């Protein structure tokens, strides 16, 4: 046996040959080429940076992030946190980031639920249902997203005014002013109840992990749902009741030419959310369908032989296995939905792109404004990718 070949029976490793400072040495050439490439890239970035700084100085354009502390004077129609035009540009950009996160998070949840349901219905044995879902998928995927956003915004603008608003349920009104929903006044008791619910979820996950470990040890299944019901619902309700059980419903009502009270969903946000959800759900539907079809037919037959109904087979046997195929492309759709939310500027929803564009127009600092937009989307995208990759690794099959 050659001295450079390891023997797997004894776990021996080949001796490591020292690197020679010679062009004939492969490792030396690799290091040299890497240093050259890094030097070239650094030189290009330095040239671009120095050229940009010099051009800004020649044109007497201010640079830097000092403008973030100045008064914005920028009106923002809706915000997650309190905002006033007398606040700084930093707070205005923070409002834009939160508005982007709001539509991205809600859109991802709704698109995932709708896309999963449509993906299952796409495989229905009912000819009418499967063909209807197939037609929906083809239509929403073939039309540009911007056109769909403009369509839904035009539909909402074409609704009647508040006095003739559509009233599908008590306290729910749909008009050209947006969607009005019943709401309640948020008090300290609700905050404590929410905290108790979060703690209950964490404790439930810990209990579930221990219950599975004990089941693997003695083969006795242990129910998790009673503990989850007690910790996630019973404990928050007890905390809420201990705080006096305050509940002040805020029902919207018509007063004059507009509605008062309740929760307002603006036409811009509503149109953006509906457009993003329906568009992304079409792609998620096909991803879910492909993941289900990737599960071998023998899994269906084996579960059916045990007497399980088709619905439980889908929920307990097929979908958990299909997740390993669904998650990677689903990550791309989550990223696409988040980045596509930047089209909100076309229908007047003030997200980070809209507010940053207004900021750079007022201050003249375009580089900083564009850099802020890029930094926000880069951070959100990397966060989504890291979480989805962690989850994909967690559900992956572990080879023994």
Image (spheres, rainbow, N blue to C red):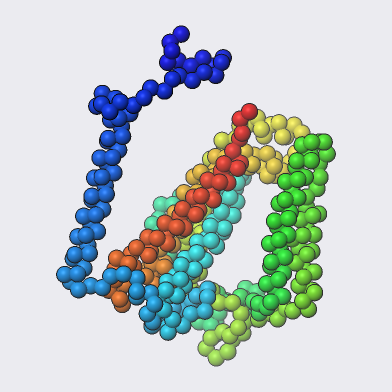
Where, quadrant-wise, is the C terminus in this rendering? top right
Which residue is located at x 34 percent, y 70 percent? 65
The percent coordinates of residue 117 (x first, y second) are: 60, 51
Which residue is located at x 26 percent, y 73 percent? 62
Mark yes or no: residue 150 visible: no
The percent coordinates of residue 147 (x first, y second) are: 39, 62
* Residue 93 picture quarter: bottom left
- 288 left or right, relative to 344: right
Mark yes or no: residue 98 visible: yes
View extreme (top): residue: 1
User: Closest to the observer: 234 or 168?
Assistant: 234
User: In this figure, what is the number of numbered marks?
Assistant: 0
User: Closest to the observer: 260 or 186?
Assistant: 186
Which residue is located at x 31 percent, y 77 percent? 362
View extreme (left): residue: 58
Which residue is located at x 69 percent, y 31 percent? 301
User: Closest to the observer: 74 or 290?
Assistant: 74
The percent coordinates of residue 85 (x first, y second) are: 42, 83
* Residue 90 picture quarter: bottom left
Image vertical order of residue 40 relative to residue 109, above or below: above
- 21 left or right, relative to 121: left
- 369 left or right, relative to 164: left
The percent coordinates of residue 296 (x first, y second) are: 61, 32
């Amino acid at each position: 046996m050659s001295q450079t070949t390891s023997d797997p029976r004894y776990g021996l490793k080949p001796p490591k040959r020292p690197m020679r400072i010679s062009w004939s040495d492969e490792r030396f050439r690799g290091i040299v080429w890497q240093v050259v490439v890094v030097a070239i890239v650094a030189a290009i970035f330095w040239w671009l940076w120095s050229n940009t700084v010099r051009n800004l100085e020649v044109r007497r354009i201010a640079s830097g992030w000092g403008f973030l502390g100045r008064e914005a004077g920028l009106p923002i129609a809706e915000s997650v946190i309190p905002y006033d035009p007398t606040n700084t540009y930093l707070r205005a950009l923070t409002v834009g980031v939160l508005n982007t996160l709001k539509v991205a998070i809600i859109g991802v949840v709704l698109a995932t639920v709708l896309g999963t349901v449509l993906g299952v219905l796409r495989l229905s044995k009912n000819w009418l249902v499967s063909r209807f879902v197939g037609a929906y998928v083809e239509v929403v995927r073939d039309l540009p997203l911007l056109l769909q956003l403009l369509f839904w915004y035009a539909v909402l603008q074409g609704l009647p005014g508040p006095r003739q608003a559509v009233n599908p349920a008590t306290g729910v009104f749909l008009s050209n002013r947006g969607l009005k929903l019943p709401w309640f006044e948020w008090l300290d008791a609700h905050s404590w109840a929410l905290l108790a619910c979060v703690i209950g979820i964490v404790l439930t996950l810990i209990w579930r992990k221990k219950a599975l470990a004990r089941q693997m040890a003695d083969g006795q299944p242990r129910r998790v749902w009673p503990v989850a019901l007690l910790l996630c619902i019973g404990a928050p309700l007890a905390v809420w009741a201990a705080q006096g059980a305050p509940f002040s419903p805020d029902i919207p009502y018509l007063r004059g030419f507009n509605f008062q009270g309740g929760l307002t969903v603006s036409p811009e946000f509503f149109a953006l959310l509906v457009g993003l959800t329906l568009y992304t759900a079409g792609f998620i539907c096909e991803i879910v369908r492909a993941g289900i079809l990737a599960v071998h037919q023998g899994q269906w037959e084996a579960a059916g032989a045990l007497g399980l109904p088709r619905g439980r087979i889908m929920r307990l046997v097929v979908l958990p296995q299909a997740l390993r195929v669904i998650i990677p492309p689903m990550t791309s759709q989550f990223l696409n939905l988040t980045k596509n939310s930047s089209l909100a500027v076309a229908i007047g929803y003030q997200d980070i792109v809209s507010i940053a564009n207004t900021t750079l127009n007022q201050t003249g600092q375009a580089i900083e404004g564009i850099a802020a937009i890029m930094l926000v989307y880069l951070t959100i995208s990397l966060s989504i990718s890291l979480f989805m990759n962690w989850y994909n690794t967690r559900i992956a099959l572990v080879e023994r």
